[in-house]
Amino acid sequence: MALILLAFLVGPIIMIVIVSFWGATEYSIYPAFQFDNYEFLFGSSVTYTVFFNTFKYAAITWALTLTIGFTVAYFLAFEVRTLKWQIALFLICTIPFWTSNIIRMISWIPFLGRNGLANTTLISWGVIDEPLEWLLFSDFSVILAFVHLYTLFMVVPIFNSMMRIDRSLIEAARDGGASGWQTLRHVIIPLCKPGIMIGTIFVTTLVMGDFITVRFMSGSQRANVGRLISNDISLLQYPSASATAVILLATVLIVIGLLLRLVDIRKEL
Amino acid sequence: MTTIPKVRYSRRTLLKSGAAALAATALPAPMVMGQESKNITLRQFGTGVSNLNEVATKVKEDLGITLEMTALDTDSVTQRAATQPDSFDIADIEYFVAKKVWPSGNLQAMDASKIANYDKIVGIFRNGKLTPESTIAQGTAPHTVGFVEGPGGTSFVDNESGWMTLIPTIYNADTLGIRPDLIGRPIESWTELLNPEFAGKASILDISSIGIMDMAMVCEAMGEIAYGDKGNMTREEIDKTIAIFTEAKKNGQFRAFWKSFSESVELMASGEVVIQSMWSPAITAVRSQGIPCVYQPLKEGYRSWGGGIGLSASLSGMELDAAYEYINWYLSGWVGGFLMRQGYYSAVPETSKEFMSENEWGYWFEGKESTGDITSPFGDKLAGSGEVRDGGSFYDRMGAVACWNSVMDENQYMVRKWNEFIAA
């Protein structure tokens, strides 16, 4: 196990760190120890905008997936009575995952387009007169796709946590005179924390590391860190891509570190 | 995204068929004694435009050579040619890519004396002149990177030295594509791309090396910038160009940027965009859906590009002979006809003529009114009787080239500014 981790995780990361100090020409990279890549990275205002965008996408997506994911999980765990139906409904949630996530993402494009289904429907209902331009190729469409793609990653761990909650605790709360809201606030949510935390880690790392969703759903008009890296790679600027990757990795690790300080997953599990 | 019939440019399907080809070669094929080339497999990669399965099928039929095709996007092509020399035998790349890749030493020079139709290759690829009176356009004109001093040569020479870097295969003159039905008035200049009339309905391609040229065509036409050489801008020129487009982007001029062929087709066909940078077969693909789309000739001229095939430095012996055989076959007409019927030009047009009907030759090459339906090699109807090709004849179009796709000395700087533009 340790060997596998060393060979396929630690090794490549060390390599990326090393390459991030190298230099590059048009068509080749050469070993060196220089800070040029980092200097350029920190010196460019684009870096800050792009990192800000990445956090923005992560934060909004997190809030929405958490709300939706928690609601769905709550329904499955507490509203659906029989185990058979719980399993059946849970499986239904996974149906969209039978297709590739690129396909699920791209299918939004004709739907949201200027002459797409969404706009024509709204116009025929008389809700709007002109097609809404911001439906597609905007921050809205990017976040919509993210939420669509990643909500299940919230549902699963939260549902799992909820199923472990001893039902007698909820009865006890009710017997003690707690309202439904108070039970949720003081019993269920605290006991779901590990699930929420695991879901949060999934969603934030997925969104922060993504590049293809942002590219397609924004019509290449927005950028996040992943796109910066992929642009560099396509232009053979591996050292500069590595430097960006190292900074992104560090940022994500800091975020996860902070999250783990809030909840001790090891203990809670 | 599946509404484009018969267009074989999706990377996924090409990879898939590549895998199928791979599987096919793994099975032992019946061998014919005395024809060693029957058993030879050449691995070729390039962009979707010329990496066509039909070519692989036909070359197998005619020469017995198995051609394994891999289609990649423009950037990945450069990447592979520069970094993975052992992964290919034949590189199908653009001339401006050659400028970038040649110094890596991954390709070998070709002996022009082994190319049967060398003398018939269009002047653009030899001395740079389409006709003796032509002037040479700005940018990386193919002939400037077409020759090296000898076998193993590392620097380009400005004469026909007899040692070629690439054998030209396919080229065209690019301009803006428009939806005449949604615009409803004549479009004559590159400046229209930034016309506020088309706010939120314009697009440009997100491939920096090509996009910057389209930008330059626009800025120059607007009279905002007078370039020394659009194909080799100074930092100041790059800054100014990007600034003009960044402002337009912030004002909502662009609906989207596209990177792949199929994206450009979708944008145009769905009406998201009415004016954009486009490639010729994309126009064809939109039209074959029954949607009007014009490859609009503009008064400032075209941005042109040319591709060619180069040989991997590691090719030798029988494989090298087979590669020459393949190249000679490539220039002998069938492929040329196949490409020209899609709207590209062949390096040796006169050999292609034999593989086209009189009507096709008249329409595609001579710019004449068609006398009957014009169909693509895939069977789609592209034009009816009495129609004329957008831009006219070969000499009208290739004679009006304002600039060639290129790699600038300040390329790295340009790429960084391009990234800023995309992120802005």
Image (cartoon, rainbow, N blue to C red):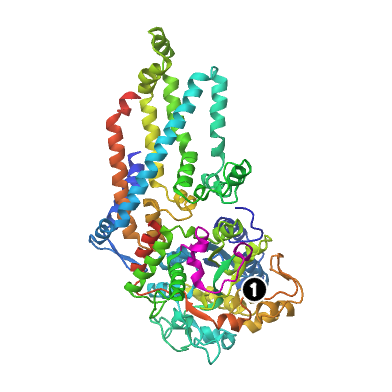
Question: Image quadrant of residue A239?
Answer: bottom left
| Residue B216 sits inside the magenta stretch | no
Residue A106 x/y as whole percent: 54, 48
| Left or right, B80 with reference to A108 | left
Q: Which residue is nearer to you in this view: B3 or A205?
A: B3
For mark 1, give the secondary structure.
loop
Looking at the image, how many numbered discs can be counted on the residues?
1
In magenta segment, residue B205: yes
Give the vertical position of B376 relative to A201 (above or below). below
Q: Amino acid at mark 1?
A: Leu
Task: Say if A89 sits above or below B155 in the image.
Answer: above
Image position, residue B388 (x, y; %): 68, 76
* Residue B168 picture location, percent across and down: 54, 78
Residue highlighted by disc 1:
B63
The stretch of residues the image draws in magenta is: B179-206
Q: Against A108, is B270 above or below?
A: below
- Rendered view: B192 above or below A73: below
Position of the C terminus of chain B by quadrant:
bottom left
Whether residue B89 is visible: no
Of residues B375 and B301, the one nearer the viewer is: B301
Q: Position of residue B291 (x, y in %)?
A: 66, 61
